[in-house]
Image (cartoon, helix red, strand yellow):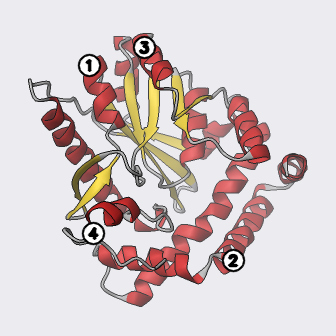
Amino acid sequence: MYRFMKIFSAFICLLPKGLQYAIGTLLGEIAWLVVPPKRKRLAIGQILFCNITDDPKEARRIAKASTTRFGRMIIDVLRYPEIKDGAYKDMVEFINKEYLDDALENGRGAILAAVHSGNWELLGGVLASEGYPLISVAMKQNGDADKFINEYRQIMHQHVTYKTGVREMINELKKGAFLGLIMDQDPGDDGVLVPFFGYETLTAAGPAVLARMQDVPIIFVTIHYSPFSEKHEIEVHPPIYVERTDDKKRDIAVTTTLLNEFIEDYIRRYPEDWFWLHNRWKWTRRFYGEHIETPPDVYR
């Protein structure tokens, strides 16, 4: 698989841009065709559950669009050898970049919170290539997939640590690093129960915990592809600070609620961009399904 992806990447980089993304569109359509029916029902059900729409046909359209966009995402990553060292600048447009510059000048580090929306992989590569001291926290992939993606992240000057490297995260924050965390997925048997789309939902508490521990801001950075400008719009949002009181659990819950409110608002803004195929309420349903409302379990 590793060798195939390297060869495929080299082939893609030889093609004109229009043909590159035509192939991406085809890959996206194929991806939707091979998604299992249960997973499609899950995505559509979650869209309806979150009141993004009350029309099942529209929910299906959103679910399909959120899947087929992966074709373009893959092409963006395969183009890394072509767009490295500044060539990516024609692909992106920054909004409110001064929030990052202020945090960098401050020198105390920051938590950069991201969402599985838009091309989050390209987002990390661009931020690292722009010279920000980004340490991306990722989930380890299997075998050749992990080898390939990490090699391509290095092409864009991106450093990655895995979710088990908590000590490394703290040490890097102390050095003034920007710690990149994606916090919108199901945290499993961990996390804190706070509102999300109006429902009590287990949510990753890592950003709030680390920000409180090190007294650093949490800054959301989002990426959205605009078909009008034909660019990825990278928007930096105002920093969020954890209120420190004598009640640590309260502080973390309050901050995580604020973060979920931001994520929810952003998903409502660009519903086709979010990863609806992910079973977001799986562990919430397992732990609390008898006591609080959750989406139906299509995997029973």
The residue mark sitting in front, 4 or 2, is: 4
Q: Nearer the viewer, residue 223 or 109?
A: 109
The residue carrying pointer 4 sits among few (fewer than 14), some (14 to 19) or many (20 or more) residues within 10 Å by Cα, namely some
Q: Label 2 sits on what residue type?
A: Val
Q: Is residue 239 above or below residue 5?
A: above
Residue 23 percent across, percent down from the top left:
77, 66
Residue 52 is at least partly visible in this image: no
Tell me whether the residue at label 1 lies in contact with that at label 4, contact meaning CB atoms closer than 8 angstroms. Answer: no
In primary-sequence order, the first of circles 1 and 4 is: 1
| x, y percent for residue 89 | 61, 37
Q: Please, is residue 168 above or below residue 62 in the view? A: above
Viewer-nearest of labels 1 and 4? 4
Q: Earlier in the sequence, mark 3 or mark 2?
A: 2
Are the residues flagged by discs 3 and 1 in contact, CB closer than 8 Å? no
Amino acid type indicated by mark 3: Gly
Mark 4 or mark 2: whose residue is earlier in sequence: 2
In the image, which disc is placed on residue 134? none
- Which residue is the site of mark 2? 34
Q: Residue tagged by mark 4?
A: 289
Residue bearing mark 3: 176
Instruction: Please report whichever mark, 4 or 3, sits nearer to the chain's N-terminal start.
Output: 3
The kind of residue on which mark 4 rests is Gly
**Mark 2: secondary structure:** helix
- Coordinates of residue 47 in the picture (x, y in percent): 37, 74
